[in-house]
Amino acid sequence: MVPPLRLYKPTCASSTPSPFLLSLRHLQRLQLSGTRGHRGLFSSLPIRPDPLAVPFSAFASYVAVRPPNKMEAYRQSQMPRFDCLLFDLDDTLYPLSSGIATACRKNIGDYMVEKLGISEDKVPDLCNLLYKNYGTTMSGLRAIGYNFDYDEYHRFYSFRSLFCFHLNSSFQSSLFLFLVFYSFVHGRLPYDNLKPDPVLRNLLLSLPIGKVIFTNADKVHAAEVLSRLGLEGCFEGIICFETLNPGADASEGHTSDSIFDIVGHFARPDAGTELPKTPVLCKPSEDAMERALRIAGINPQRTIFFDDSARNVLAGKRIGLHTVLVGTSHRIKGADHALESIHNLREALPELWEGAEKEDVRYSGKVAIETSVTA
């Protein structure tokens, strides 16, 4: 049975540091990295907390108070360089040719026309500017003054369980509109284009490193995509829209009487006015990305970030991540590697497997049953 996908949630601020949560799998990994042969597993402290299990701030504080010594430096030199792989979802784990992105853009445009009353001829330019300046269209719409229910927005361009809808202005009957809401069950996004990918699944499962999804999409869309690709059980958790925007409900407010005209703003030759800020946190905002890493307890210095967006990759590089641009073999500024396809992962980064192979040769034995330990 595939374990449920863990959704990372923000932790409440507290003056009391969080306890280190380890597991025997993590302890075994430490044992294999150099602690074996000493007087018991715990006598050879310090034990390096797993960055996927503790807040990075706690991890950094722990390291800061431990002065390094020669033995410790040697052990660290024997450790794998990376202990977390952070993956974007859409157009990274599957190709752009699937048509998901194209359908998504169309559905967002429909939402803007039908639900927000934006003129259809203004949608293309508006979408481009919002995406360019705010990372996502949703984030930009909120910034310039539109309020709407986030769940409804996601339902409109995603499948959102069994309730996907498409409103057409030519339909006048409210009852018919209600029926149309429920009739577009499987047609809003072409999820059928996503097929199980056993090659990618085997590739991910063969990696002896923690793997996490980091997407701007909502959790239901993420779960559906992973299910369609047959990648359940390949990731330890997911950072998604709800992670960075917990309890967000823009529907409680009202659309501003004065919508900021961002198209007109950039049409002026003296467009120097600062743009309004958005309440939505998402990539490629460096603040949003740093917050996501803190929530998930990920150390950026020991993490490889995979994304198809050049902006996201550059932002990831700025906050200390090792970066891989997916979807092209052309390496750009901010990208340490470039992959035409995520399937080229092993050819591009063979060192991710080398450490595990060495450990398997040096230490072969029974694997302990995984359980939780609080230390």
Image (cartoon, helix red, strand yellow):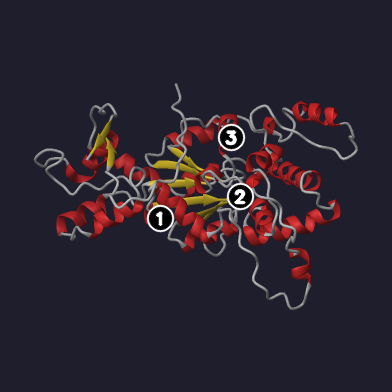
Residue 59 shown left or right of residue 247 in the figure: left
| Few, some or many residues within 10 Å of mark 2 (<14, 14–19, 20+) | many
Q: Quarter of the image containing the N terminus?
A: top left
Q: Residue at x 82, y 56 (%)?
A: 122
Q: What residue did someone put label 1 on?
A: 300
Asked if residue 250 is positioned above or below residue 133 in the image, the reply reads above
Q: In this view of the protein, which residue sits in the foreground, 316 or 282?
A: 282
Q: What residue did someone put label 3 on?
A: 220
SS category of the residue bearing label 2: loop
Q: What residue did someone put label 2 on?
A: 327
The part of the image, by quadrant, that contains residue 61 is bottom left
Asked if residue 165 is positioned above or below residue 333 in the image, the reply reads above
Asked if residue 182 is positioned above or below residue 342 in the image, the reply reads above
Label 2 – label 1 distance at C-alpha: 22 Å
> Disc 2 marks which amino acid?
Gly
Marks 3 and 2, the one that precedes in the sequence: 3
SS category of the residue bearing label 1: helix
> Disc 1 marks which amino acid?
Pro
Give percent across and percent down for residue 103. 74, 41
